[in-house]
Each structure stands twice: as C-alpha cells, then as structure tokens.
Image (cartoon, rainbow, N blue to C red):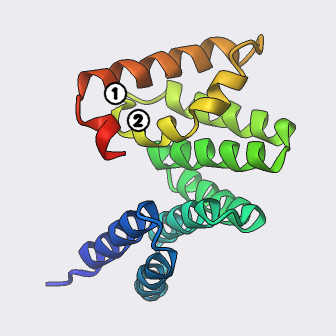
C-alpha cells in the first residue's frame, strides 16, 4: 500500500504545528520533506497544498514577497484543480499578505475572488481557521459597497461558528 498522501499530509500538518509554535526551522524541515513527496507525484493538488503551507510559513516569518509568490501559486493550482475550499483559503491568506505589504488594490481583488468562491461552497466550516486569520482584512472592507455585504456575512459566520466551539479560540 502506498502511504504517499498520508505522509505528505503528516509533513504539512507538522509544518503547520511547528510554524504556529514559532519553530520556523523545524517547520522548514517538514516542508522540505513534503516537497520531496510532491516532486515524486507531480500532482497539482499536492503542489498547491505545499505552496499554501509554504506561503503560510513565509507570512509568519514576515517574508511578504515570498509569501505572495507561494500563495499566488497555491491559489492558481488549487483553483485550476477545482478545489474551491482550498483556493478560497489561499485567497484569504493572499489578501492578508497584500494588506501587510500595503497593497490594498490587490488585497481587494483577491478578497473578491475568495468571497466569490466562498459563496459557492456548501459549508464554510473548514474556512474558519483561514477566515480567523483574515478577520482584520474582512473588517477593512466592511464599508466597501461591493465587498461589504459579503465581508460582513463571512465575519458573522466565522464569529458564530467560533462561538459554538468553546475550545476553538484556545487552540488557534
């Protein structure tokens, strides 16, 4: 039995965990291991997942240009592959990266992409974590005549879902 996808997901999960703990060098080690697995598979989906976590790490390290490249690549690969949920998550992080870079025009553009994808999803529950990370960006666009209503709706859904799970604020 081939455990390739399981091993990839473990490496990506360990990278995310060590990133959240601020252990960036360990996170990079897990990403290197994941990259080797991705290169063997030639899967756009797996490359998109890797780029997403790599972009998350670069964002955490304050490497905004690298984060923008990685998250843009993640969005492209995931969107082309039809993974709407993952593509929406990448767009929300891209919005955050553009905002941190001071590029409100591109932040607005990728948030619009994310909100369009989100509106087509059956459930946004898996987006709560990515959405929590982009709450400030969503709040920034609340007054926007085009993005405002969707931003408010997503913010409310994130807040309501987080309130229903008492341990969520503690673990994230």
State the SS at label 1: helix
In percent of width and height, residue 61 lies at 63, 66
Query: Which one is nearer the viewer's eye here, 114 or 20?
Result: 20
Q: Which residue is mark 1?
A: 162
Instruction: Indicate left or right for 118 with 163 as reference.
Output: right
In percent of width and height, residue 63 lies at 71, 66
State the SS at label 2: helix
The residue located at (61%, 20%) in the rendering is 151
**Mark 2 to mark 1 CA distance (whole Å):** 7 Å
Q: Please tell me whether mark 2 or mark 1 is closer to you in this view.
A: 1
In percent of width and height, residue 143 lies at 74, 12
Q: Residues within 10 Å of mark 1 (few under 14, many from 20)?
A: some
In percent of width and height, residue 85 lies at 45, 43
- Vertical arrangement, residue 61 with respect to residue 78, above or below: below
- Vertical arrangement, residue 10 with respect to residue 39, above or below: above
Q: Earlier in the sequence, mark 2 or mark 1?
A: 2
Q: Which residue is mark 2?
A: 128
The residue located at (45%, 89%) in the rendering is 36
Query: Which one is nearer the viewer's eye here, 24 or 121?
Result: 24
Query: Which one is nearer the viewer's eye here, 68 or 117?
Result: 68
Where is the N terminus found, in terms of image quarters? bottom left
Mark 2 touching mark 1, by CB under 8 A? yes
The residue located at (45%, 85%) in the rendering is 29
Tag shown at residue 95: none
Q: Residues within 10 Å of mark 2 (few under 14, many from 20)?
A: some
The residue located at (55%, 69%) in the rendering is 54
């Amino acid at each position: 039995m081939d455990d390739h996808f399981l091993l990839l997901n473990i490496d990506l999960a360990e990278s995310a965990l060590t990133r959240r703990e601020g252990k960036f060098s360990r996170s990079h080690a897990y990403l290197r291991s994941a990259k080797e697995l991705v290169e063997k598979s030639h899967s756009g989906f797996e490359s998109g997942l890797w780029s997403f976590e790599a972009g998350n790490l670069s964002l955490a390290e304050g490497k905004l240009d690298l984060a923008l490249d990685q998250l843009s690549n993640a969005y492209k690969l995931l969107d082309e592959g039809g993974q709407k949920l993952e593509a929406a998550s990448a767009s929300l992080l891209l919005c955050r990266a553009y905002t941190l870079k001071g590029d409100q025009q591109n932040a607005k553009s990728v948030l619009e992409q994310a909100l369009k994808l989100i509106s087509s999803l059956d459930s946004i529950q898996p987006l709560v974590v990515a959405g929590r990370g982009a709450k400030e960006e969503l709040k920034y666009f609340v007054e926007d005549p085009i993005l405002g209503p969707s931003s408010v709706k997503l913010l409310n859904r994130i807040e309501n879902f987080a309130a229903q799970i008492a341990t969520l604020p503690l673990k994230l």
